[in-house]
């Protein structure tokens, strides 16, 4: 998944991945963060024990610079063996011949739809390793103050009616909308689009499907929500909406599972799946980070094996459970019984995985972001009609592909 360990994650190991001697092979594994996780080190140690003469240089690089460092090394012809990258970078790296396709086992029990976050025209380019979904947070105290029962809205119409009831009967905005020139403006819109059966880019064919009835219905609903949202949505990004929610200035907004622990303890909060639009069922954006295998090291097969080990079994489960991530694998199918995501708010974040859609993969992410920002801001500011804005967005996406 933008502002969290989900959306910023990228693992780095600097240094070249090369043969130190005729008998010793060193893999460079680039890892994000200030330290190496115990579970990852254990997996690396198991890998080394299986391969005589193989070592792994596991280097933790600070968040914010690790991903750029991997790309810089690869572009300079000194690639790491494997690295932790945002899946949004996969098309750029694949198009520039910096990475090799992932070798994901056919029986890998990924949650439905997760592989679409790393797939370009039918080919997977990364091993999904960190995963997030979104849901709707509701301040029940505000809803009840407005004279309404705090029950999760199942449809857009029910959500709008609840938000309007808040606006009509309190001094609070009914819903928080993100409209700033920032990536989570696109993410917020895609939560609604995927809850309306929409598609941006077909992972199997690479076809642009943004210009559609489903997108028009979603943008029309977004324009309608402006009337019950906080003032000036184009000035706000998602994490700022969290602050408005904590301050009791908005009654509801869409956020990831980490939001629950970031809200004030005195808020009686209800968490629910994103309501369904007229052409779909409740969905969510699916965002992953991935382990990628770089090209040109001479030991790609070993790198694939290590990547598979890191993204499976206890190593993957430890990452998901300790970081509070949406489960990326079907751990029940793997025989685990200590499933952290079966209780509490988690079912709201897992129920919509199969109906969710991926963060679109393009070479120039900034161009993709602009496609959605222009469209969303256009309807918020009432600069153009829904039909024109969606038509233009479809044309702009063609140029970004």
Image (cartoon, grey):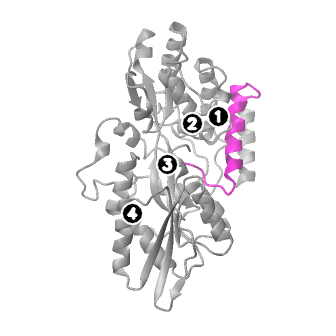
Q: Check disc 1: other Cα within 10 Å, few if <14, some if 14-19, many if 20+.
A: many
Which numbered disc flags the more N-terminal residue, 1 or 3?
3
Q: Residue at x 76, y 29 (%)?
A: 384
Q: Which mark is residue 189?
A: none
Decide: is 38 above or below 342. Answer: below
Q: CA distance from mark 2 to mark 4?
A: 32 Å
Q: CA distance from mark 1 to mark 3?
A: 29 Å
Q: Position of residue 3 (x, y in %)?
A: 55, 43
Q: Check disc 4: other Cα within 10 Å, few if <14, some if 14-19, many if 20+.
A: many
Decide: is 187 above or below 378. Answer: below
Which numbered disc flags the more N-terminal residue, 3 or 2?
3
Q: Which residue is mark 3?
A: 6
- Which stretch appears magenta? 358-386
Q: Secondary structure at mark 2?
A: helix
Q: Is residue 382 magenta?
A: yes
Q: Which residue is mark 4?
A: 40
Q: CA distance from mark 1 to mark 4?
A: 45 Å
Between circles 1 and 4, the one closer to the viewer is 4
Q: Which residue is mark 1?
A: 216
Q: Position of residue 395 (x, y in %)?
A: 75, 46
Q: CA distance from mark 1 to mark 2?
A: 16 Å
Between circles 4 and 3, the one closer to the viewer is 4
Between circles 1 and 2, the one closer to the viewer is 2
């Amino acid at each position: 998944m933008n502002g969290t360990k989900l959306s910023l994650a990228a693992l780095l190991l600097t240094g070249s991945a090369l043969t130190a001697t005729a008998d010793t092979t060193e893999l460079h594994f680039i890892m994000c963060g200030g330290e190496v996780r115990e579970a990852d080190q254990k997996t690396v140690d198991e890998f080394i024990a299986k391969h005589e003469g193989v070592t792994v240089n596991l280097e933790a690089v600070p968040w914010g610079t690790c991903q750029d460092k991997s790309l810089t090394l690869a572009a300079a012809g000194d690639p790491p063996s494997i690295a932790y990258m945002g899946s949004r970078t996969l098309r750029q790296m694949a198009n520039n011949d910096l990475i090799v396709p992932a070798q994901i086992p056919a029986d890998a029990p990924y949650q439905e739809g997760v592989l679409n976050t790393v797939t370009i025209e039918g080919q997977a380019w990364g091993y999904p390793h960190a995963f997030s979904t979104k849901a709707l947070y509701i301040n029940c105290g505000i809803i009840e103050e407005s004279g309404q029962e705090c029950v999760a809205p199942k449809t857009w119409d029910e959500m709008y009616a609840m938000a309007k009831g808040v606006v009509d009967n309190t001094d609070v905005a009914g819903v928080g909308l993100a409209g700033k020139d920032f990536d989570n403006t696109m993410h917020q819109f895609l939560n609604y689009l995927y809850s309306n059966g929409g598609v941006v880019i077909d992972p199997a064919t690479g076809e642009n499907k943004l210009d559609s009835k489903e997108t028009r219905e979603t943008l029309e609903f977004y324009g309608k929500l402006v009337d019950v949202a906080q003032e000036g949505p184009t000035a706000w990004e998602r994490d700022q909406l969290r602050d408005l929610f904590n301050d009791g200035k908005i009654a509801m907004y869409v956020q990831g599972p980490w939001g629950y622990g970031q809200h004030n303890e005195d808020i009686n909060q209800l968490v629910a799946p994103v309501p369904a639009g007229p052409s779909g069922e409740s969905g969510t954006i699916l965002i992953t980070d991935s382990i990628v295998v770089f090209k040109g090291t001479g030991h790609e097969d070993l790198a694939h094996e290590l990547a598979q080990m890191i993204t499976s079994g206890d190593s993957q489960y430890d990452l998901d459970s300790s970081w509070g991530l949406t489960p990326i694998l079907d751990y029940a199918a793997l025989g685990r019984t200590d499933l952290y995501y079966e209780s509490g708010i988690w079912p709201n974040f897992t129920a919509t995985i199969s109906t969710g859609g991926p963060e679109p993969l393009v070479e120039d992410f900034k161009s993709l972001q602009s496609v959605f920002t222009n469209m969303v801001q256009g309807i918020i500011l009432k600069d153009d009609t829904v039909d024109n804005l969606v038509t233009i967005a479809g044309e702009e996406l063609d140029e970004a592909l």
